[in-house]
Amino acid sequence: MEYAWWLSATVLGWLTFGRVLEEKQRSSLAVVIGFISFFFYKLFYNAVALSPGGETATNIAHMFGAVSGTLSFLICWGIRLWFAKRSKQSLVDKDLNQPESPAEDDTTINKIPKKIKQHNWRFYFLLSIFSICLLIVAWSFRWEHGPTLNKDNLTIIYTKDRWTQQTWMSLYGTEKNKVYSGDTLPAHSENEVKYRAYQILKSPENVQKRRNYEDLAREAEKNIKQYELGHAKYIDIVDSLQQRENRARLARVFEYLRHEEYEHAIPQKFIDDNLNWIAQNKLITDSKSGIKKLEEQAEAEAKSTLDDRAYLLRSITTIIWAFLLLLSSILAIVLLRKGFFSKQEGEFKS
């Protein structure tokens, strides 16, 4: 797809814009501008395609690549044709200012290109006005309003950006002591967040951290088995002593605590086994908590990365739209002034 874009831009430039140039410049310039267009296409494509999102991210990447490649293609050819027109105009003006004979003067006038002799500013002026109207209409169709969700004291309004195929939500109300008044946040699907978190967890650093936690838990699970019998005896003795004193047993934490007040009646081996069992069990618990915390951090980082990507894509599309609108407006004003003054000059000469 990428190299097909380079070939298409080269052939299209050679067949269209390159027709007004000399044969030697035509082919080389078409290849160079085609490569520039391909470069910007690839640059913006990679910037978006490397982000998560599956098929949606790929489609958006192609869209941004096509827009940037087309803009660079038109800008480069526009600049080159402008310089070509300026050089031709300077040659024509030089010949007109130095006529040698009436016959040569007529010949020189006939050499003036038709585009220079004709007043075709109206066509480009109407084209720029059409571009302005098209951009305004495109902006009005950019946002699609979705459903509204009411959750306790919070109202969520969903909108979809048709240009980037992204979903946004506007928040109004309060939630967890936070006040929202139209705050707009990206709305990501659960699969998109999980896919990005999976990519983060697959990084060499996180893989090594998870492996360390798993090795530590595996070693602790292996060691804890030799202390299970002594730990069970310790708990049975403490339980029997508590029953004699008619104490209520704390079932959830009973087996994970040391009961020093009863250890005077417990053999030292059972006490040591119980302490070792508690230590190994803590290692297992800490390792599992570390893995869970690692996954939570990856999910938080995934959401932050997706948010940054969403804001970036929205900003880029808005900037491109504003740039095209400003360019079309400036072109319309310049052409209008040019046509107005050329008309006044014609009336003055007549």
Image (cartoon, rainbow, N blue to C red):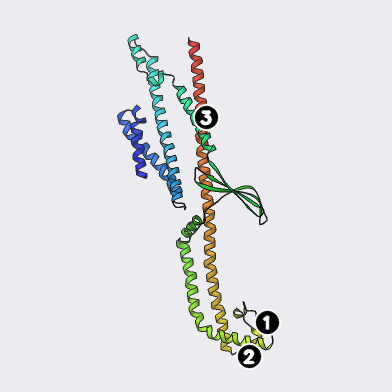
Around disc 2, counting alpha carbons within 10 Å, would you say few (fewer than 14), some (14 to 19), or many (20 or more)?
few
**Viewer-nearest of labels 3 and 1?**
1
In the rendered image, the residue lying farthest to the left is: 23
Q: Kindly check if marks 1 and 2 are in contact, taking CB atoms under 8 A apart as contact.
A: no
Which residue sits at x=38%, y=14%? 98
- Residue at image point 54% right, 62% down: 296
Residue at numbered disc 3: 329
Q: Earlier in the sequence, mark 3 or mark 1?
A: 1
Q: Which residue is mark 2?
A: 265
Q: Earlier in the sequence, mark 1 or mark 2?
A: 1
First in residue order: circle 3 vs circle 2: 2
Tell me if 48 is positioned left or right of 304 in this view: left
- The correct choice, above or below, for 82 with respect to 234 in the image is above
Q: Residues within 10 Å of mark 1 (few under 14, many from 20)?
A: few
Q: Position of residue 241 (x, y in %)?
A: 65, 88
Mark-to-mark CA distance, 3 and 2: 94 Å
Q: Under tag 1, what secondary structure?
A: loop
Q: Amino acid at mark 3?
A: Ser
* Image location (x, y in percent) of residue 157: 60, 48
Amino acid at dot 1: Ala
Residue 215: x and y in percent read 47, 72
Q: CA distance from mark 1 to mark 2?
A: 20 Å
Image spot of residue 57 (x, y percent): 46, 49
Question: From the viewer's perspective, is the residue at label 1 or at label 2 nearer?
Answer: 1
The three-letter amino acid code for the residue at tag 2 is: Ala
Regarding mark 3 in the picture, which secondary structure is present there?
A: helix
Q: Which residue is mark 1?
A: 248
Local packing at callout 3 (Cα closer than 10 Å; few below 14, some 14-19, many 20+) is some
Residue at image x 51%, y 80%? 224
User: In the image, what residue occupies the spot 50% across and 25% down?
Assistant: 334
